[in-house]
C-alpha cells in the first residue's frame, strides 16, 4: 500500500475510534511560528506536559508529529506559512483516546530538532520544533564541521568553576560527636560526593580545597578560590551547636557588621579561631590610597554579599527537601573563610554533629549522598538564574529562552 494511503487510513481510523474526550487531556492551545536565517521554529503551547513522537515521509515531503494524551483546541489557520518550509498543516485524532496527529506538508526535506520546555518566564509547557532545510544544512556542516545551531560557533561557552572547601582537616578535627564522629571526615565525604556530581554536569568544573585529611589555614582556603577563578565558593561544615538539642542544616554568608543571630556569631568565632585574615590584601590594593581602597573593597564586598545571600537562599531551598533546617533564612556573621571580595561565598552547616540524630545520619553514605545532591540542585538552580558571562550555562539559557 502506498505510504500516503496508510497515513490517510490511520487518520480516518483514528477519527472513527476516538473515545469521548476526557477532561484530563492536555490541550494543544496555540501555535506560533518564527523564521531565522537558518531555521524555522514552530512552537506549540500546551496546557501540560506531553509525550510525543515525530517522523518524516517523502514524496511528498511531510513531517508527522504524534502527541499522546493531548487534544487540539487551538487552530493553525493564523500562521503565516508563505515562503516557509511548511506548505500547510493538518491535524486529526489517531490511535485510541486523546492522541493527536499533526501533519506538516513540506516544500522540501527537512532536518528536525525538537524538544519540550516546562513553564518558565510567563510561558507554559511548550513543544518546540526547529526545522532546517536538509540540503542547506548538510552543505553547511560539510563546510564548517559545526552543528548548524545559532551562536554555536561564536559563543566561548566556558565552564562554571565551583570551589568546594571541606572544613577543618589534619590536626584540626572540627567538632566531634558523642560517638567520636569527626566533622572533618563527614565534610570531606560530602565535599567529594558533591565534586563528583558537579563533574558529571556539562558546563561545570570543580576544585576541592583539600581532597584528603590535612590542615589548611583559612587564608589559604580563600586563596584557592582566587587561584582557580572560582564563580562560587562553598565551605562545608557539620559543627557543634551551642545547644545539644539544636539540629538541622543552616547556611551562612559574610556580614561586615554584626552577626544576624547569636548562633551565627558563635559559629563565626569558633571557625575563625586565631586564624584571622584581612581581605584587603587579596585585592592588591596596597599601592592605592587607603581611603579609596576601602571604598572599592566595600562596593565589591556589597555586591558579593548580595550574590552570596541569593546563592545561600537557593541552596537552603533545595536542602529543605533533604533535611530539617535549623534556620529558614541565610544567617550572616564575620566568617574569615568567606572574605573573598569578588567570589560569592557561603558556609553550609550540613547538620550539627553535637546532635545525636544529626550525627547518626551524617555518617551514613546515603545521607551524605542526599546532602551532596541537595547542594548540587541548589547551585545549579542558582546558576540557571544567574549564568556567568560567556558560560556554557548562559549559552544554554539563551538557546532555551530565545524565541519560544
Ligand atoms: Zn566547622
Image (spheres, rainbow, N blue to C red):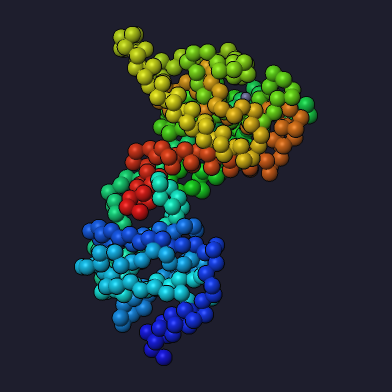
357, 339: nearer the viewer: 357
Direction bottom: furthest residue: 1
Q: Residue 352, image x and y in percent? A: 68, 27
Q: Residue 315, image x and y in percent? A: 54, 35
Q: Residue 234, image x and y in percent? A: 52, 31
Left or right of 157, for residue 321: right
Q: Is residue 96 visible?
A: yes
220, 7: nearer the viewer: 7
Direction right: furthest residue: 179
| As drawn, 7 above or below 203 | below
190, 89: nearer the viewer: 89
Q: Residue 41, image x and y in percent? A: 32, 60
Q: Number of numbered discs present?
A: 0
Residue depicted at 45% across the width and 55% down the height: 125
Residue depicted at 26% across the width and 59% down the height: 35
- Quadrant of the image containing the C terminus: bottom left
Q: Can residue 148 be seen in this view?
A: no
Amino acid at each position: 500500500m502506498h505510504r500516503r494511503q496508510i497515513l490517510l487510513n490511520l487518520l480516518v481510523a483514528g477519527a472513527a475510534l476516538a473515545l469521548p474526550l476526557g477532561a484530563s487531556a492536555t490541550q494543544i492551545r496555540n501555535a506560533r511560528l518564527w523564521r531565522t536565517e537558518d531555521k524555522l521554529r514552530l512552537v506549540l503551547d500546551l496546557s501540560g506536559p506531553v509525550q510525543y513522537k515525530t517522523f518524516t515521509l517523502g514524496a511528498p515531503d511531510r513531517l508527522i508529529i504524534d502527541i499522546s494524551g493531548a487534544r487540539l483546541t487551538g487552530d493553525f489557520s493564523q500562521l503565516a506559512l508563505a515562503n516557509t518550509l511548511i506548505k500547510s498543516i493538518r491535524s486529526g485524532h489517531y490511535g485510541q483516546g486523546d492522541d493527536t496527529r499533526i501533519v506538516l506538508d513540506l516544500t522540501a526535506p527537512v532536518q528536525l530538532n525538537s524538544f519540550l520546555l516546562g513553564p518558565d518566564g510567563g510561558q507554559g509547557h511548550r513543544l518546540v520544533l526547529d526545522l532546517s532545510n536538509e540540503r542547506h544544512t548538510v552543505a553547511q556542516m560539510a563546510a564548517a564541521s559545526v552543528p548548524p545551531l545559532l551562536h554555536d560557533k561564536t559563543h566561548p561557552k566556558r565552564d562554571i568553576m565551583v570551589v568546594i572547601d571541606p572544613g577543618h582537616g589534619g590536626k584540626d578535627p572540627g567538632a566531634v560527636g558523642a560517638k567520636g564522629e569527626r566533622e572533618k571526615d563527614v565534610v570531606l565525604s560530602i565535599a567529594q560526593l558533591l565534586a563528583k556530581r558537579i563533574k558529571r554536569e556539562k558546563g561545570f568544573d570543580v576544585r576541592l580545597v583539600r581532597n584528603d585529611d590535612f590542615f589548611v589555614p583559612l587564608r589559604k582556603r580563600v586563596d584557592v578560590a582566587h587561584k582557580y577563578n572560582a564563580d562560587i565558593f562553598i565551605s562545608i561544615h557539620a559543627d557543634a551547636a551551642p545547644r545539644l538539642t539544636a539540629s538541622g542544616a543552616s547556611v551562612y554568608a559574610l556580614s561586615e557588621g554584626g552577626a544576624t543571630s547569636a548562633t551565627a556569631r558563635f559559629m563565626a568565632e569558633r571557625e575563625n579561631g586565631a586564624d584571622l585574615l584581612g581581605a584587603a590584601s587579596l585585592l592588591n590594593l596596597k599601592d592605592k590610597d587607603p581611603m579609596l581602597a576601602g571604598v572599592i573593597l566595600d562596593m565589591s564586598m556589597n555586591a558579593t554579599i548580595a550574590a552570596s545571600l541569593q546563592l545561600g537562599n537557593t541552596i537552603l531551598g533545595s536542602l529543605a527537601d533533604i533535611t530539617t533546617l535549623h534556620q529558614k533564612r541565610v544567617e550572616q556573621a564575620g566568617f574569615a573563610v568567606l572574605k573573598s571580595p569578588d567570589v560569592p561565598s557561603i558556609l553550609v552547616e550540613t547538620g550539627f554533629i553535637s546532635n545525636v540524630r544529626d550525627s547518626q545520619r551524617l555518617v551514613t553514605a546515603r545521607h551524605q549522598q542526599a546532602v551532596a545532591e541537595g547542594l548540587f540542585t541548589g547551585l545549579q538552580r542558582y546558576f540557571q538564574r544567574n549564568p556567568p558571562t560567556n558560560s556554557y550555562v548562559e549559552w544554554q539559557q539563551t538557546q532555551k529562552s530565545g524565541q519560544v
